[in-house]
Amino acid sequence: MQTCDHPCSACQSRCHRQNTSAATKKDALAKLALAADFSLGVEQVPLAEALHRVIGQDVLAAWDSPVADYATHDGIAIVREEAGASVSALLAPDRFQIVGMGNVIPEPFDTVLAYELCSFQSDGSVRLLGLSEKGEGIIRRASSIRKGELVLGKGFLLEPRHLAILRYSGIEQVSVYCKPTAAIIPVGSDLTLPGITPAPGQYPEADGILVESVIRLCGGTARLRPPVQDDIAALKGAIQSELTACDMVVLIGGVGLGGEGYRDFSRAAVEDLGSVLVHGLSFGPGGKAALLGVIDNKPVIGIPGPPHAAILVTEELIPPIMELFLDIPCYERPVITAEAGVDISAKRTSDFFPRVRLSSDNGRYIANPVRMGDNIETFARAEGIARYRRGMEYPKGSPVEVELLYSEKQLSRQLTKE
Protein backbone atom coordinates (compact mmCIF):
# COMPACT_ATOMS: atom_id res chain seq x y z
CA MET A 1 0.00 0.00 0.00
CA GLN A 2 1.45 3.36 -1.03
CA THR A 3 1.76 6.06 1.61
CA CYS A 4 0.01 9.37 0.98
CA ASP A 5 2.49 12.28 0.93
CA HIS A 6 0.08 15.03 -0.11
CA PRO A 7 -1.64 17.45 2.25
CA CYS A 8 -5.40 17.02 2.07
CA SER A 9 -5.91 20.58 0.85
CA ALA A 10 -3.95 19.83 -2.33
CA CYS A 11 -5.04 16.25 -2.90
CA GLN A 12 -6.96 15.20 -6.02
CA SER A 13 -7.32 11.52 -5.11
CA ARG A 14 -10.37 9.64 -3.90
CA CYS A 15 -8.88 9.14 -0.45
CA HIS A 16 -11.38 8.26 2.28
CA ARG A 17 -10.54 11.53 4.01
CA GLN A 18 -12.07 13.34 1.02
CA ASN A 19 -15.18 11.17 1.06
CA THR A 20 -17.66 13.34 2.93
CA SER A 21 -20.81 11.94 1.29
CA ALA A 22 -20.48 8.23 2.04
CA ALA A 23 -23.67 6.18 1.87
CA THR A 24 -25.38 4.83 4.95
CA LYS A 25 -25.27 1.07 5.44
CA LYS A 26 -29.05 0.89 5.09
CA ASP A 27 -29.08 2.70 1.74
CA ALA A 28 -26.13 0.71 0.42
CA LEU A 29 -27.72 -2.64 1.29
CA ALA A 30 -31.01 -1.52 -0.28
CA LYS A 31 -29.16 -0.82 -3.55
CA LEU A 32 -27.48 -4.20 -3.41
CA ALA A 33 -30.77 -5.98 -2.70
CA LEU A 34 -32.26 -4.53 -5.89
CA ALA A 35 -29.21 -5.08 -8.10
CA ALA A 36 -28.11 -8.63 -7.25
CA ASP A 37 -29.74 -12.05 -7.33
CA PHE A 38 -30.15 -13.60 -3.88
CA SER A 39 -32.20 -16.66 -4.87
CA LEU A 40 -31.00 -20.08 -3.74
CA GLY A 41 -31.60 -23.63 -4.90
CA VAL A 42 -33.15 -26.33 -2.72
CA GLU A 43 -31.59 -29.63 -1.67
CA GLN A 44 -32.73 -32.68 0.28
CA VAL A 45 -30.79 -33.47 3.46
CA PRO A 46 -31.21 -36.14 6.14
CA LEU A 47 -33.07 -34.88 9.19
CA ALA A 48 -30.00 -35.52 11.37
CA GLU A 49 -28.03 -33.02 9.22
CA ALA A 50 -30.73 -30.34 9.05
CA LEU A 51 -29.97 -28.42 12.26
CA HIS A 52 -29.85 -24.66 11.60
CA ARG A 53 -30.76 -25.11 7.95
CA VAL A 54 -33.62 -23.11 6.42
CA ILE A 55 -36.62 -25.06 5.10
CA GLY A 56 -36.97 -24.69 1.33
CA GLN A 57 -40.57 -25.94 1.00
CA ASP A 58 -43.48 -26.64 3.33
CA VAL A 59 -43.16 -29.87 5.33
CA LEU A 60 -46.33 -31.98 5.69
CA ALA A 61 -46.81 -34.78 8.21
CA ALA A 62 -46.22 -38.25 6.79
CA TRP A 63 -48.61 -39.98 9.21
CA ASP A 64 -51.14 -39.45 11.96
CA SER A 65 -49.91 -39.02 15.50
CA PRO A 66 -50.87 -40.84 17.51
CA VAL A 67 -51.50 -43.60 14.97
CA ALA A 68 -54.33 -45.14 17.05
CA ASP A 69 -56.59 -44.40 20.03
CA TYR A 70 -54.65 -44.88 23.32
CA ALA A 71 -55.63 -45.10 26.99
CA THR A 72 -54.41 -42.21 29.11
CA HIS A 73 -54.72 -44.21 32.37
CA ASP A 74 -55.38 -47.71 33.68
CA GLY A 75 -58.99 -48.94 33.78
CA ILE A 76 -61.60 -50.56 31.58
CA ALA A 77 -62.54 -49.60 28.04
CA ILE A 78 -66.30 -49.35 27.54
CA VAL A 79 -68.90 -48.13 25.08
CA ARG A 80 -70.23 -45.10 26.93
CA GLU A 81 -73.83 -45.42 25.64
CA GLU A 82 -74.07 -48.95 27.06
CA ALA A 83 -73.35 -47.63 30.56
CA GLY A 84 -76.58 -45.63 30.50
CA ALA A 85 -77.26 -42.45 32.42
CA SER A 86 -77.24 -43.76 36.00
CA VAL A 87 -74.62 -45.27 38.27
CA SER A 88 -74.59 -49.04 39.05
CA ALA A 89 -74.86 -50.31 35.49
CA LEU A 90 -73.68 -53.92 35.12
CA LEU A 91 -71.54 -54.77 32.07
CA ALA A 92 -71.06 -58.32 30.83
CA PRO A 93 -67.46 -59.58 30.34
CA ASP A 94 -67.68 -59.13 26.57
CA ARG A 95 -68.80 -55.47 26.93
CA PHE A 96 -65.58 -54.09 28.41
CA GLN A 97 -61.83 -54.66 28.21
CA ILE A 98 -59.15 -54.09 30.83
CA VAL A 99 -56.50 -51.66 29.55
CA GLY A 100 -53.34 -50.12 30.89
CA MET A 101 -52.08 -46.60 30.29
CA GLY A 102 -50.74 -46.40 26.73
CA ASN A 103 -52.61 -49.46 25.47
CA VAL A 104 -54.36 -49.30 22.12
CA ILE A 105 -58.14 -48.98 22.48
CA PRO A 106 -59.87 -51.49 20.18
CA GLU A 107 -63.18 -50.79 18.52
CA PRO A 108 -65.97 -50.27 19.44
CA PHE A 109 -64.86 -48.89 22.82
CA ASP A 110 -64.86 -45.10 23.16
CA THR A 111 -64.26 -44.35 26.86
CA VAL A 112 -61.88 -45.53 29.61
CA LEU A 113 -63.28 -45.78 33.15
CA ALA A 114 -60.77 -45.70 36.02
CA TYR A 115 -60.44 -48.83 38.20
CA GLU A 116 -61.70 -47.01 41.27
CA LEU A 117 -65.04 -46.57 39.53
CA CYS A 118 -65.37 -50.33 38.90
CA SER A 119 -66.51 -53.27 41.04
CA PHE A 120 -65.53 -56.59 39.49
CA GLN A 121 -68.02 -59.41 40.06
CA SER A 122 -67.30 -63.11 40.54
CA ASP A 123 -68.94 -63.99 37.23
CA GLY A 124 -66.53 -61.72 35.33
CA SER A 125 -68.92 -58.86 34.89
CA VAL A 126 -68.30 -55.38 36.28
CA ARG A 127 -70.59 -53.00 38.10
CA LEU A 128 -69.93 -49.32 37.46
CA LEU A 129 -69.61 -47.18 40.58
CA GLY A 130 -69.32 -43.94 38.64
CA LEU A 131 -69.54 -42.56 35.13
CA SER A 132 -67.25 -40.60 32.80
CA GLU A 133 -68.08 -38.45 29.82
CA LYS A 134 -67.81 -40.11 26.45
CA GLY A 135 -64.24 -40.03 25.18
CA GLU A 136 -62.62 -39.51 28.61
CA GLY A 137 -59.49 -41.52 29.29
CA ILE A 138 -58.60 -41.74 25.59
CA ILE A 139 -56.20 -39.79 23.40
CA ARG A 140 -57.62 -39.98 19.91
CA ARG A 141 -55.83 -40.98 16.72
CA ALA A 142 -54.42 -37.93 14.89
CA SER A 143 -55.34 -35.66 17.82
CA SER A 144 -51.76 -34.31 17.88
CA ILE A 145 -50.83 -34.42 14.20
CA ARG A 146 -52.90 -35.37 11.17
CA LYS A 147 -51.33 -36.89 8.05
CA GLY A 148 -50.86 -34.16 5.46
CA GLU A 149 -51.03 -31.36 8.05
CA LEU A 150 -48.49 -28.52 7.75
CA VAL A 151 -45.77 -29.10 10.34
CA LEU A 152 -43.26 -26.37 9.43
CA GLY A 153 -43.46 -23.81 6.66
CA LYS A 154 -41.00 -22.70 4.02
CA GLY A 155 -38.37 -20.30 5.35
CA PHE A 156 -38.29 -21.78 8.87
CA LEU A 157 -34.90 -22.01 10.62
CA LEU A 158 -34.59 -25.50 12.10
CA GLU A 159 -33.79 -25.73 15.82
CA PRO A 160 -33.45 -28.95 17.88
CA ARG A 161 -37.12 -28.94 18.92
CA HIS A 162 -38.17 -28.75 15.27
CA LEU A 163 -36.14 -31.83 14.38
CA ALA A 164 -37.99 -33.72 17.12
CA ILE A 165 -41.48 -32.80 15.88
CA LEU A 166 -40.47 -33.61 12.29
CA ARG A 167 -39.34 -37.08 13.29
CA TYR A 168 -42.51 -37.50 15.35
CA SER A 169 -44.41 -36.63 12.15
CA GLY A 170 -42.60 -39.27 10.10
CA ILE A 171 -40.15 -36.96 8.32
CA GLU A 172 -36.58 -38.18 7.73
CA GLN A 173 -35.61 -36.05 4.70
CA VAL A 174 -36.05 -32.28 4.59
CA SER A 175 -35.94 -29.87 1.65
CA VAL A 176 -33.71 -26.96 2.69
CA TYR A 177 -32.20 -24.00 0.91
CA CYS A 178 -28.67 -24.58 -0.31
CA LYS A 179 -26.11 -22.78 1.80
CA PRO A 180 -24.98 -19.49 0.24
CA THR A 181 -21.44 -20.01 -1.01
CA ALA A 182 -18.84 -17.24 -0.94
CA ALA A 183 -15.55 -16.99 -2.78
CA ILE A 184 -13.12 -15.12 -0.51
CA ILE A 185 -10.20 -13.49 -2.32
CA PRO A 186 -7.52 -11.74 -0.24
CA VAL A 187 -5.67 -9.12 -2.31
CA GLY A 188 -2.11 -8.00 -1.71
CA SER A 189 1.42 -8.77 -2.89
CA ASP A 190 2.61 -8.24 0.69
CA LEU A 191 0.45 -11.03 2.20
CA THR A 192 1.93 -14.32 3.38
CA LEU A 193 0.28 -17.72 3.55
CA PRO A 194 -0.79 -19.10 6.95
CA GLY A 195 2.07 -20.40 9.06
CA ILE A 196 4.80 -18.56 7.16
CA THR A 197 6.74 -16.00 9.19
CA PRO A 198 6.40 -12.63 7.45
CA ALA A 199 9.55 -10.87 6.32
CA PRO A 200 9.92 -7.10 6.75
CA GLY A 201 7.25 -5.47 4.58
CA GLN A 202 5.03 -8.54 4.65
CA TYR A 203 1.88 -9.26 6.64
CA PRO A 204 0.14 -12.54 7.53
CA GLU A 205 -3.15 -13.03 5.73
CA ALA A 206 -5.55 -13.22 8.70
CA ASP A 207 -8.73 -11.58 7.44
CA GLY A 208 -9.81 -14.53 5.32
CA ILE A 209 -10.46 -16.87 8.24
CA LEU A 210 -12.43 -14.07 9.94
CA VAL A 211 -14.70 -13.58 6.93
CA GLU A 212 -15.07 -17.32 6.39
CA SER A 213 -16.04 -17.88 10.03
CA VAL A 214 -18.69 -15.14 10.01
CA ILE A 215 -20.18 -16.58 6.82
CA ARG A 216 -20.34 -20.03 8.40
CA LEU A 217 -21.97 -18.66 11.56
CA CYS A 218 -24.58 -17.03 9.32
CA GLY A 219 -25.47 -20.33 7.66
CA GLY A 220 -23.23 -20.18 4.60
CA THR A 221 -20.09 -21.82 3.32
CA ALA A 222 -16.96 -20.35 1.78
CA ARG A 223 -13.90 -21.09 -0.30
CA LEU A 224 -10.85 -19.11 0.85
CA ARG A 225 -8.29 -18.61 -1.92
CA PRO A 226 -4.60 -17.89 -1.44
CA PRO A 227 -3.78 -14.16 -1.71
CA VAL A 228 -3.81 -12.60 -5.18
CA GLN A 229 -1.02 -10.23 -6.22
CA ASP A 230 -1.60 -6.48 -6.63
CA ASP A 231 -2.25 -6.87 -10.34
CA ILE A 232 -5.57 -6.08 -11.99
CA ALA A 233 -5.31 -8.87 -14.56
CA ALA A 234 -4.55 -11.43 -11.85
CA LEU A 235 -7.41 -10.15 -9.69
CA LYS A 236 -9.91 -10.22 -12.55
CA GLY A 237 -8.80 -13.74 -13.41
CA ALA A 238 -9.29 -14.87 -9.81
CA ILE A 239 -12.79 -13.39 -9.69
CA GLN A 240 -13.80 -14.93 -13.00
CA SER A 241 -12.52 -18.35 -11.99
CA GLU A 242 -14.75 -18.35 -8.91
CA LEU A 243 -17.98 -16.88 -10.28
CA THR A 244 -19.61 -20.05 -11.57
CA ALA A 245 -19.21 -21.94 -8.28
CA CYS A 246 -20.25 -19.23 -5.81
CA ASP A 247 -23.21 -17.05 -4.88
CA MET A 248 -21.13 -14.03 -3.86
CA VAL A 249 -17.56 -12.75 -3.96
CA VAL A 250 -15.70 -11.16 -1.07
CA LEU A 251 -12.56 -9.17 -1.88
CA ILE A 252 -10.29 -8.40 1.06
CA GLY A 253 -7.94 -5.49 0.45
CA GLY A 254 -7.26 -3.34 -2.56
CA VAL A 255 -10.35 -1.22 -1.88
CA GLY A 256 -8.65 2.06 -0.96
CA LEU A 257 -10.29 5.09 -2.52
CA GLY A 258 -6.93 6.18 -3.90
CA GLY A 259 -7.36 3.65 -6.68
CA GLU A 260 -4.71 2.20 -8.99
CA GLY A 261 -2.23 4.95 -8.17
CA TYR A 262 -1.98 3.39 -4.72
CA ARG A 263 -2.07 -0.15 -6.15
CA ASP A 264 -5.68 -0.59 -5.02
CA PHE A 265 -7.21 -2.53 -7.91
CA SER A 266 -10.37 -4.03 -6.43
CA ARG A 267 -12.69 -1.24 -7.55
CA ALA A 268 -11.27 -1.23 -11.07
CA ALA A 269 -11.61 -5.02 -11.32
CA VAL A 270 -15.26 -4.91 -10.24
CA GLU A 271 -16.00 -2.05 -12.65
CA ASP A 272 -14.39 -3.93 -15.55
CA LEU A 273 -16.35 -7.13 -14.83
CA GLY A 274 -19.59 -5.65 -13.54
CA SER A 275 -20.54 -2.50 -11.66
CA VAL A 276 -19.73 -0.74 -8.39
CA LEU A 277 -22.85 0.30 -6.53
CA VAL A 278 -21.31 1.95 -3.48
CA HIS A 279 -17.73 2.73 -2.50
CA GLY A 280 -17.53 4.17 0.98
CA LEU A 281 -19.96 3.77 3.87
CA SER A 282 -20.62 6.22 6.66
CA PHE A 283 -19.22 4.31 9.62
CA GLY A 284 -15.77 3.67 10.97
CA PRO A 285 -13.27 2.30 11.36
CA GLY A 286 -13.04 0.91 7.85
CA GLY A 287 -16.41 1.81 6.38
CA LYS A 288 -15.11 4.64 4.19
CA ALA A 289 -13.23 2.06 2.06
CA ALA A 290 -15.97 -0.61 1.96
CA LEU A 291 -17.31 -1.53 -1.46
CA LEU A 292 -20.50 -3.12 -2.74
CA GLY A 293 -20.91 -4.17 -6.34
CA VAL A 294 -22.41 -6.72 -8.71
CA ILE A 295 -20.82 -9.10 -11.23
CA ASP A 296 -23.03 -11.47 -13.23
CA ASN A 297 -25.96 -10.64 -10.91
CA LYS A 298 -23.91 -11.83 -7.93
CA PRO A 299 -23.10 -9.53 -4.99
CA VAL A 300 -19.51 -8.45 -4.52
CA ILE A 301 -18.30 -7.15 -1.17
CA GLY A 302 -15.02 -5.26 -0.82
CA ILE A 303 -13.50 -5.24 2.67
CA PRO A 304 -10.47 -3.16 3.72
CA GLY A 305 -7.30 -5.10 4.46
CA PRO A 306 -6.18 -3.75 7.87
CA PRO A 307 -7.56 -6.34 10.32
CA HIS A 308 -9.04 -3.84 12.78
CA ALA A 309 -11.04 -2.33 9.90
CA ALA A 310 -11.81 -5.69 8.30
CA ILE A 311 -13.38 -7.07 11.46
CA LEU A 312 -15.89 -4.23 11.76
CA VAL A 313 -16.77 -4.06 8.05
CA THR A 314 -17.17 -7.85 7.96
CA GLU A 315 -19.51 -7.86 10.94
CA GLU A 316 -21.49 -4.89 9.62
CA LEU A 317 -21.97 -6.17 6.05
CA ILE A 318 -21.73 -9.95 5.85
CA PRO A 319 -24.64 -10.81 8.24
CA PRO A 320 -27.25 -8.56 6.55
CA ILE A 321 -26.14 -9.80 3.12
CA MET A 322 -26.51 -13.40 4.30
CA GLU A 323 -29.99 -12.45 5.51
CA LEU A 324 -30.84 -11.35 1.95
CA PHE A 325 -30.07 -14.91 0.84
CA LEU A 326 -31.72 -16.84 3.66
CA ASP A 327 -34.35 -14.35 4.88
CA ILE A 328 -33.58 -15.09 8.54
CA PRO A 329 -31.81 -13.02 11.21
CA CYS A 330 -28.24 -14.11 11.87
CA TYR A 331 -25.23 -13.12 13.95
CA GLU A 332 -27.44 -11.39 16.50
CA ARG A 333 -25.79 -10.09 19.66
CA PRO A 334 -27.24 -8.68 22.88
CA VAL A 335 -27.28 -4.90 23.24
CA ILE A 336 -26.98 -2.99 26.52
CA THR A 337 -26.83 0.65 27.57
CA ALA A 338 -23.54 1.63 29.19
CA GLU A 339 -22.00 4.90 30.34
CA ALA A 340 -19.26 6.53 28.29
CA GLY A 341 -16.00 6.22 30.23
CA VAL A 342 -14.42 9.16 28.39
CA ASP A 343 -15.60 12.13 26.33
CA ILE A 344 -16.32 11.11 22.72
CA SER A 345 -17.22 13.30 19.74
CA ALA A 346 -18.35 11.36 16.67
CA LYS A 347 -17.46 12.78 13.28
CA ARG A 348 -20.08 14.86 11.54
CA THR A 349 -20.10 12.57 8.48
CA SER A 350 -19.86 9.08 9.95
CA ASP A 351 -20.79 6.86 12.86
CA PHE A 352 -17.99 5.62 15.10
CA PHE A 353 -18.07 2.00 16.28
CA PRO A 354 -14.96 1.33 18.38
CA ARG A 355 -14.28 -1.81 20.39
CA VAL A 356 -14.64 -1.13 24.10
CA ARG A 357 -13.68 -2.66 27.42
CA LEU A 358 -16.48 -2.82 29.94
CA SER A 359 -16.32 -2.49 33.70
CA SER A 360 -19.11 -2.76 36.24
CA ASP A 361 -19.87 -0.22 38.97
CA ASN A 362 -22.88 -0.88 41.22
CA GLY A 363 -24.81 -2.53 38.43
CA ARG A 364 -23.80 0.04 35.80
CA TYR A 365 -21.57 -0.74 32.83
CA ILE A 366 -18.79 1.70 31.95
CA ALA A 367 -17.48 1.60 28.35
CA ASN A 368 -13.93 2.65 27.47
CA PRO A 369 -12.57 2.39 23.91
CA VAL A 370 -9.56 0.11 23.48
CA ARG A 371 -6.41 1.15 21.64
CA MET A 372 -7.40 1.01 17.99
CA GLY A 373 -5.26 -1.14 15.74
CA ASP A 374 -4.32 -4.66 14.77
CA ASN A 375 -3.64 -5.69 18.34
CA ILE A 376 -4.72 -8.08 21.07
CA GLU A 377 -6.84 -5.43 22.77
CA THR A 378 -9.06 -5.07 19.69
CA PHE A 379 -9.43 -8.77 18.91
CA ALA A 380 -9.29 -10.49 22.30
CA ARG A 381 -9.69 -8.05 25.17
CA ALA A 382 -12.70 -5.99 24.06
CA GLU A 383 -16.12 -7.01 25.38
CA GLY A 384 -18.31 -4.83 23.21
CA ILE A 385 -18.75 -2.41 20.31
CA ALA A 386 -19.92 1.08 21.21
CA ARG A 387 -22.34 2.79 18.85
CA TYR A 388 -21.42 6.49 18.68
CA ARG A 389 -23.69 8.17 16.14
CA ARG A 390 -22.48 10.80 13.68
CA GLY A 391 -22.39 14.38 14.84
CA MET A 392 -23.22 13.46 18.44
CA GLU A 393 -21.35 14.45 21.59
CA TYR A 394 -20.93 11.82 24.31
CA PRO A 395 -19.60 13.43 27.50
CA LYS A 396 -18.17 11.10 30.10
CA GLY A 397 -21.03 9.43 31.96
CA SER A 398 -23.58 9.84 29.16
CA PRO A 399 -25.51 6.76 27.92
CA VAL A 400 -24.19 4.87 24.92
CA GLU A 401 -25.48 1.77 23.15
CA VAL A 402 -23.05 -1.17 23.31
CA GLU A 403 -23.34 -4.38 21.30
CA LEU A 404 -21.91 -7.16 23.43
CA LEU A 405 -19.36 -9.58 22.00
CA TYR A 406 -20.41 -12.11 24.65
CA SER A 407 -23.62 -13.03 26.41
CA GLU A 408 -24.32 -11.03 29.57
CA LYS A 409 -23.79 -14.19 31.62
CA GLN A 410 -20.34 -14.74 30.12
CA LEU A 411 -19.54 -11.04 30.42
CA SER A 412 -20.43 -11.12 34.12
CA ARG A 413 -18.09 -14.05 34.65
CA GLN A 414 -15.26 -12.30 32.84
CA LEU A 415 -15.67 -9.09 34.79
CA THR A 416 -15.68 -11.10 38.05
CA LYS A 417 -12.32 -12.65 37.13
CA GLU A 418 -10.67 -9.29 36.39
Image (cartoon, rainbow, N blue to C red):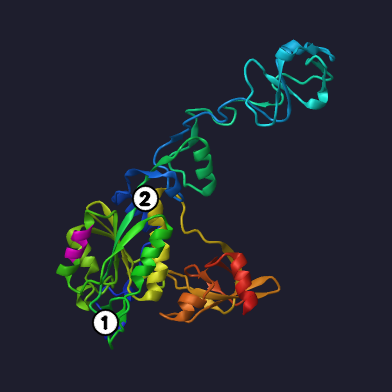
Residue at label 2? Answer: 325
Q: Is residue 239 magenta?
A: yes
Main secondary structure along the magenta-highlighted residues = helix
Label 1 crowd (10 A; few <14 / some 14-19 / many >=20):
few
Q: Is residue 84 above or below residue 316?
A: above
Q: Is residue 118 above or below residue 60?
A: above
How many numbered circles are shown?
2
Q: Which residues are magenta?
A: 236-242
Secondary structure under tag 2 reads: helix
Residue 125, how many percent across, how many down? 78, 15
Residue 145, how many percent across, how many down? 55, 31
Amino acid at dot 1: Ala
Residue 377, how many percent across, how many down? 48, 80
Quadrant containing the N terminus in the rendered view: bottom left
Q: Is residue 174 magenta?
A: no
Which residue of the protein is positioned furthest toward the bottom in this rendering? Answer: 200
- Left or right: where does residue 370 sit relative to residue 127? left
- Left or right: where does residue 109 sit relative to residue 35? right
Which residue of the protein is positioned furthest toward the front in this rendering? Answer: 122
User: Which label is found at residue 10?
Assistant: 1
User: Which label is found at residue 59?
Assistant: none
Secondary structure under tag 1 reads: helix
- Left or right: where does residue 13 sit relative to residue 328? left
Q: Nearer the viewer, mark 2 or mark 1?
A: 2
Quadrant in which residue 218 is drawn: bottom left
Quadrant in which residue 209 is drawn: bottom left
Name the residue at 25% across, 82% down.
2
